[in-house]
Amino acid sequence: MASFDDLIASDTPTLVDFYATWCGPCQTLMPILSQVKDSLGERLTIIKIDVDRNPQLAAQMQVRGVPTMMLFRSGKPLWRQSGVMSKDEIIGTVLEKIN
């Protein structure tokens, strides 16, 4: 299995969704992220990380609340945001950061 660093090292921007199964806002965000992926297709990779299954990674990335989204390109963090955002807000932010 690829390491987290391998997953975010891609030239293709990678949006990481740190979530928890018990988190209501996280459940709200799931279909929104599916719509974002449908809209951006190959221009964006989306990875979901369950903080309860990956507590060391969540701590390393300083995730204090869920959902927290982080955008990476070539291993470098470009943006992070906690909480639910609309599809258009996420797409607008991603395109702004990667262009």
Image: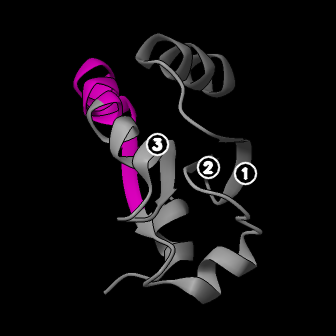
Label drawn at residue 72: 2
Residue 61 higher or lower than 67, as above or below: below
Res. 11 in view: no
Q: Earlier in the sequence, mark 1 or mark 2?
A: 2
Mark drawn on residue 25: 3
For residue 87, which quarter of the picture? top left
Task: Give the label on residue 77, or none.
Answer: 1
Q: Give the range drawn in magenta.
A: 32-48
Q: Can residue 5 be seen in this view?
A: yes
Is residue 24 left or right of 8 when viewed as pictured?
A: left
What residue is at 72 percent from the left and 70 percent from the top?
61
Q: Nearer the viewer, mark 3 or mark 1?
A: 3
Instruction: Give x and y (percent) for residue 16.
Output: 50, 53
9 relative to 89, above or below: below
What residue type is disc 3 on? Pro
Where in the figure is residue 81, as x and y percent of width and height? 69, 40
Query: At 49% from the left edge and 45% from the top edge, which residue is drawn?
Result: 15
